[in-house]
Image: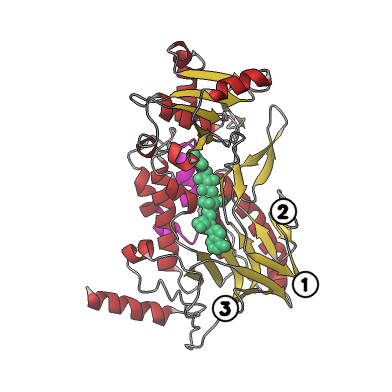
Amino acid sequence: MALAAGALIKRSLSRLIGCRAELFAAASTARFHSAPETLWQNTVPPLDSAGSLINRFASLVVGAGPAGLAVATSLLDSACDPILWVDPHFQSGRLHSYLDVPSNTKTKLFIQFAEWPQHTASSAPEAVRHFQDQDPDKGCQLQLAQEMVTSMTHGLHRDHADKVCLQRGRVTSMVLEDGLWNINEGRAFAKRAYLATGSHPRDDSPYPDLQKLDLDDALIPSKLSGLVSSEDTVCVIGSSHSAVLVLMNLLEMRDGPKVVNLHRSPMKYAKYLTDGTIILDNTGLKGVAADWSREKIETQHFEQTGRLQRVNISETPQEAVQQAVSACNKIVSAVGFNRNPLPKIVVEGKQLSSNDIRHDPHSGVIIPDRLFGYGIAFPEKVVDPEYGHTENNIGLLKFMKYVRKTCLARARTEGSAAGFSVMHRTA
Ligand SMILES: Cc1cc2nc3c(=O)[nH]c(=O)nc-3n(C[C@H](O)[C@H](O)[C@H](O)COP(=O)(O)OP(=O)(O)OC[C@H]3O[C@@H](n4cnc5c(N)ncnc54)[C@H](O)[C@@H]3O)c2cc1C
């Protein structure tokens, strides 16, 4: 075992061209998962083929959730390497918190995500193996998507350690100096930086007297059952996919609590057209949540049994809303996500505040040719084909399509000027 590991290390080192993933080169799968979060200190910079230390990269990718993976694989397919890819855990980002949660995406869209990038093609069969017993036209547990993202990340590390350097830790500062990002005070430098840093649930409850339940806990039946009982009345705010999953978990619980659901609009359902268009693709209910809502909410099943009171706060007088809330002792807010804190970003001597960080939701550009944002923190905006409103385009395959559309286009136009060659995906 030790000999095999030694041979692996030697082979990895001899293959090195652009960078060495120091923490990962010898890591077993178990170690890959279990190393603690660091602030990226006391780590050894990568080596080049001559064994010299290198710390200059064409691209920095911050975050290894599904969006970071989409960016890293797309940059690799666009020959924008060497790439420094940083995350505290490399465990697929927030998906890791939602293992027991049913997806709103059909399984085949996850499979398309895995099969798209050229440079992870050899690990795609392993990554999609997790879906082998699933109906591709139905949803699945998010655990399978989490395993797929982790498999692809491992595959990228295993097969492309010469081009992508996985660094466990956090990017804490990025200073743009002389056209290069100085990362974490000189630990590395990169020409372009891609933020895929994710978001967390908003928890700004308007009712501070009620005990807050964490949305991430409320989404998982096994966690939720230890947090509420039939003695409780839980206020659930929202009517999103997450809110409906929380309602389902609370109301289907044996000896569960009573529930007051504050919402602004009727339940909305995604509509699938025969030409492949999806109406309300990002804001309508899908999958298990849609089926359950149609069966139990639209029929007022739980209102008839006295377990549920639904209150439309747009139409109900304030006193009546207050009265409904006064019956509650706990609250879960499912009203959206806020961007995670970003690293300190300094440009031309000025530190950017979070208000200064604006991205173009059609190209991902934050600072032209230097800084880009992707994923749930920097989503693409799309127009609903039927109702005409704008939605954030959230989901694994949507991230992959958006990143590739914009990264590949940029690499084609800017790549030659930057000295990068461009590889095109063969269909
Ligand atoms: C209930 C629920 C159900 C969902 N169902 C589906 C579904 O069915 N299908 C689907 O496609 N999507 C689904 N999603 C959406 C999907 O899981 C998320 O949108 C996705 O995880 C967001 O990906 P991301 O890569 O943008 O961010 P994240 O997954 O949050 O990843 C961000 C990563 O960046 C890291 N990071 C942050 N700051 C730094 C830093 N300074 N330095 C280094 N690393 C940093 C974080 O640690 C994290 O690992 C669902 C989401 C929810 C909440």
Disc 2 crowd, CA 10 A, few/some/many (<14, 14-19, 20+): some
Spot occupied by residue 227 in the image (x, y as percentages of width and height):
39, 36
Is residue 32 shown left or right of residue 283? Answer: left
Alpha carbon distance from label 3 to label 1 = 19 Å
Question: Which residue was labeled with disc 2?
Answer: 359
Q: Residue furthest top?
A: 304
Spot occupied by residue 212 in the image (x, y as percentages of width and height):
50, 38
Question: Which residue was labeled with disc 1?
Answer: 348
Given residues 119 and 257, the one toward you in this image is: 257
Q: Say whether disc 1 or disc 2 marks the residue closer to the N-terminus.
A: 1
CB-based contact (under 8 Å), mark 1 and mark 2: no
Spot occupied by residue 76 in the image (x, y as percentages of width and height):
55, 65
Is residue 343 shown left or right of residue 232? Answer: right
Given residues 176 and 51, the one toward you in this image is: 176
Label 3 SS: loop
Determine if the C-beta at disc 2 is less than 8 A from ligand 1. Answer: no
Question: Magenta residues?
Answer: 103-124
Question: Which residue was labeled with disc 3?
Answer: 187
Alpha carbon distance from label 2 to label 3 = 26 Å
* Kind of residue sitting beneath label 2: His
